[in-house]
Structure formats: C-alpha cells, structure tokens
Image (spheres, coloured by chain):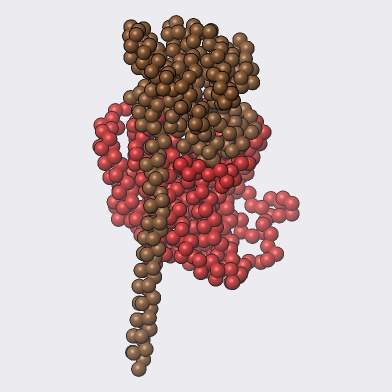
Amino acid sequence: MKIFNMNIKVTFWRILFVIIMVLGIYSTYVRYLKGLGAVSAMTDQFPWGLWIAFDCLCGIMLAGGAFCITGAVYIFHVERLHSIVKPTVLTAFLGYVLFIVGLLFDLGRPWYIWHMIIYQNLHSVMFEVGMCVMTYTTVLFLEFLPNVLERFHINWAIKVVKFIYPVLIVLGILLSTLHQSSLGSLFLIVPEKMHPFWATPATPFFFFLSAIACGIAMTIFESTISSRAFGRGLERSVLVELGGALYIIVMVIALLRLQDYVHRGVFMSIFHPSYEAYFLWAELVLCFVIPLVMLSFKKVRTNPNLLYIAALSTILGFVTNRVNVALTSMEAWVGYHYMPKWTEVSITIMICAMGFFCFSLAVNYLPIFEEEHKHASAPLDPAARIGDVPQPELVH
Amino acid sequence: MSKAILYDATMCIGCKQCEDACAKQNQLPYDDKVAAETVQSDHKYTVVLTRNDKFMRRLCQHCEHPACVSVCPVGAFQKTPEGPVVYDVKKCIGCRYCMLACAFSVPKYEWQKLNPRVRKCIMCPDRIAKGQPTACAEACPTGATKFGEREDLVREAQDRIRQNPGNYIDHIYGLNEVGGTGVLMLSSVPFEPFGLPKLDRIGETPLPEYTGRVMKLMPDFIPLWGLILGGVYWVSNRREEVAEVEAEERAQRGGK
C-alpha cells in the first residue's frame, strides 16, 4: 500500500498496532480533557486502579532484568551472560520510561511531578521510590547510551561512559534493590485494608525477589519473540542458563511464600474456596506450579519454545500477584470489585504497544543482539526512509 | 496542648447543623440534595449518618500520627502543633497515596476536575488560630460536637461513660485507634456499621510505624550495600587483572 509516497506493508500486527494507538489516543484525550473520573474506574474507595497495579507496579517489576544481569556480569564476572546485557538494559530503560509515561496519566496533577525534587518528605516510601526511579532512569539511559553512540561512531563519548560504567552498575543495583522492594513497602501502611493472603510484612522482599524472577523471565521472553520476529535472539546455551536461573529463583520464592503463609497461620485458608482464593490460585498456578513443573524437566530447559512458555507463565503469574496485592486484596475492605473502564485499559495497552514498538525499533537499528546482528544487517543507507527500511513488527 | 473534637452520638439529634456550618466555613455548596448525601465526598467533608434512629458523625479523625502525613511524597499534608491535619494543594502532585493509606478512608478526590485536589476536613485551622472553636462545634445546638483540649476531652469522655455506663458502650473511639486520633467519639451502639473500623482491625500502632520500620534501615543499608557491591566488583576485577598479567608472564616465559 502506498501512503505518502512510502511503501508500507500491511500486516495483521501493524493493523492491530494502529487500532490500539487510535483507541489509546482517544482515551488520552478523555483523560486530559475530562479528568481521571471520566477515563478510569477509580473512585474515592479505589484511589489506585489498574494504572498503578499494572503500569507502575508490573512495569517496574518487568524491567528488573537489567540490575540482575548487569550485576551478574559486571560485579560477579559471569562472562557467559555478557550477550544479554544489552537487551536487558534496553528493556529496563524502555520499562522505566514507560513507567513515567504511565505516571503522567495516573497522577492527578502530573504537571507538578517535579515537586518531588523540591518538597521532599523523607518519611515517605513514595518519595524514596520516586527519587530512586528518577536516578535509576538516568543511570539506565547512560548504560544504554553506548548502543546509540556506537551506531553513530562517537568514540570519545563511548570512552567517557565506559570509564564511569562500574559506578553506573553499582549505583544501578543499589537503586534497584531500594525501589524494587520499596514498591512493596508502599503497601505496608495498609495492613488493615488488605486480605490476609497478601497482607504480609514480607511484601518488600517478595517484590524484590519477583523483580529478579521476572527480569530473567522477560529476558527469555524477549529473546524468543525477537528471534522469531527479526531472527535476532540469544544463543541457546545462554537461554538454557537463564532457564536454570529462573528455576532456582522461582523455587526460592515458592518456599519463602509457603513459609510466610505457614508463619502467619493463613496456610489452611488458601484451600477454602473464596473470591480471593480464586485469584490466589490463579497466581500460584501461573507463578509456581506451571514454571516449576515445566522447568524441572531438562527437555524443557533446553527447548527454547517450552522455555518461552515457562517464562511467559512466570511473568503472567507475578503480574497477577501484583494486581492482586494492589486491587484484589482491597476489594473485601472496600465492599465491591474493581472493574476498569475500557478507556483505562486502552491506555495501558497503548503504553505496552509503545514499548513493543520502541523495542523492535531499537533491535532493528541498534547493535542490541550482537552475535546475530553482524550478518543480519548491512550498513544502513543514510537516505533510507522509514517506509523503505525493514519495518519493525510487533510480536509474532 | 493539641486541640480535639469530642463527638457524643447519644447527644446528637441529627439536625445536620454541623454539615451546614462546615459547608459555609469551607465555601462548599449546601442544599437539601447535599444534605441527603450520606457519604463524605469532595464537596462534603462531614456527614451525619443515621442507622436505626442512632446517629454518627463522620469527619477527618485528625490522627495523632497521621498516615497521610507520613506517606505524602511532597509533604502536602502536615499535622500542625495545634492538632489539625492540614493539606497544601500547592505541593500536591495527585498520587493519591494519602487516600489509600488512610485507615478511615477520609481524603476524597475531585475525580471530575482537570487539576484535582484532595478534599477533607481540616479542623478549621484559621478559626483555631483565632482562638475560636471549629465551625461544626460552634453550630451544634446540643453540644454533641464539642471542641477543646484533647486531654480535657478524654477526661470528660471517661467521666461521661463512668457516670452513665448504661448509656454508652465502654469505648472511646479514637483514644487509642492507630495511636490515638484528634476526634474522640462516644456512642451507645457499635461504631463499625458506620464505617469506623474496629480497634482490633486497625490496631493501636500508629500506621506510619509500619513503613517507618523499613525506612529507618535506609541510612545504614545504602552505604553498606554500596560498599559490598563495590568490594565484590573490585575483587573480581582485580582477580581478572592478575590472571591476565600471569597469562602474559607465562607466555613470555614460554617464548624464551
């Protein structure tokens, strides 16, 4: 099809992307012209809705891969994982930028977001999260920058970044430890409002650990989809290694969760059917049962397709967990169920789609997946226009 | 030192004069329609509830250790030395953590506005500064809402229960709830059906302590964890350097 003199191939994923963007832009219009009440299902009873539960809590969790992998590679010198540093840093950078985009939708007065820098409340967990996210996004930007600099051969700047790289890595892990767990600490102040399934003082630990698990799972997930979509992914040996790491961390979390339930005396109530129990079961099956059963077979850990399913299940499981913490656990206290409006959902989907789009752009134009990239792309024609170059596609 | 409100539901006649006075004080609309509303909202900071001919007033509890003050990332909420928990809209970024954190679900939001504010009873700080009682206490025809020093009001509430034990349930709501609140309540029927959570549910621990326990680890945790990470980095980096030099030496020796 010819649009504005550009050859654009029409595919299912592109049509879907356009539909998502159109709906999302309409909802954005409603958000900024009619207010939060018009666009979302949030009320005085549910001051935090889908955007906090999914865009913010899950967005940050899914971007947690960077600090685990950079830590393993640069701090502990696990050299075999070197090839996944770039994709995870990219994911994390995009994840944090999209988190901030999500915040601009969710905050009632987003134009005052900078107030956090000048009016500091040191007692506030939210303040700590805000400052950490702000600094860490800068750190991730600097960690990501060499990809762009390499692409344009700005060598002096690469040297500068390389020089401060160790500081960036240590700072990145430090900040991640703080805010990944602090996202859980946000909920420590409302033990009375939360269902006992999720109201545990260990929430910060579980948030931190699930960020590690999801960070690894996301790396597997992305590598698989980008190798299917663009033929650029990770070597099988690295994937196998990640599968093993995922198995261990999910196992550790499962044992700690069990210990937490037994310790707080709510273990038996898990088995009594109730509204909350159904959500908990969904979470536990996706988080623990499916991945642990699957990953215990060597056949799964060495098969990229099955590994992909195990990783996807883990991701969905921990996403369910965070949505449960933020919404499901409060529903009994509030007295009704939170049902997001379609406009609210469409903004969330738009933000996700933007993430996929930016990821595919970066994978196509920047040296992200090193090994396969060498022979996959010819030097770019400076005259190439958006319509001519191989177009990035969404998930396959 | 700190000011408080004592509300005695047994003396309340449900005339809603307090609602009216509150609306006037805060320049909010008040008519029959608003009077009929039975929930606190962005345009109704206090509400007199009726249940089986029993009344109960709801308003901000003005906690001694307010959750909203501790959670606000920009410090838009403050507990003044006089007792009121006040809100500064100029600082607010609209994260609504205050609304989530409040055990009494008091802060309400202007969901329909484009530059929304958090709305709640602020205990008439301007009037208190002038030495006047709150608007609601002044308007109350029966003295069911009484304004004064918290210590005096606690003593008075205890006296009332002691003198008329049959008239009250033996509990001053707000004396110990979440570490004590600036609004004390007496009633002949349980508070819970009116949306005031039970003491055994919300506890006597000031809510900010739950997050404070974690937050106060930060000043120690940050340098310690940074040092460990830096140390491990240095060791593993050094090990690699040494290995490289050794490999070089070995190669040189082999070359001879």
The x, y position of residue B175, in whole percent, is 38, 23
Is residue A74 shown to the viewer in this render? yes
Q: Residue at x 48, y 61 (%)?
A: A168
Direction from residue A352 to residue B199 in the image, left or right = left
Q: Residue at x 28, y 32 (%)?
A: A266
Q: Quadrant of residue A75?
A: bottom left
Is residue B111 shown to the viewer in this render? no
The x, y position of residue A236, in whole percent, is 40, 61
Q: Residue at x 74, y 54 (%)?
A: A5
For chain A, what colour was chosen? red
Q: Residue at x 55, y 50 (%)?
A: A97
The brown-coloured chain is labelled: B
Q: Where A319 sits versus A381, above or below?
A: above
Direction from residue A109 to residue A306 in the image, left or right = left
User: Which residue lies most toward the right here?
Assistant: A5
Give B75 or B107, whichever is nearer the viewer.
B75
Give B162 or A54, whichever is nearer the viewer.
B162
Q: Where A146 sits versus B45, above or below?
A: below
Give A154 or A375, whichever is nearer the viewer.
A154
How many marks overall? Answer: 0
The x, y position of residue A295, in whole percent, is 32, 51
Q: Where B82 sits versus B50, above or below?
A: below
The x, y position of residue A296, in whole percent, is 29, 51
Give B247 or A319, whichever is nearer the viewer.
B247
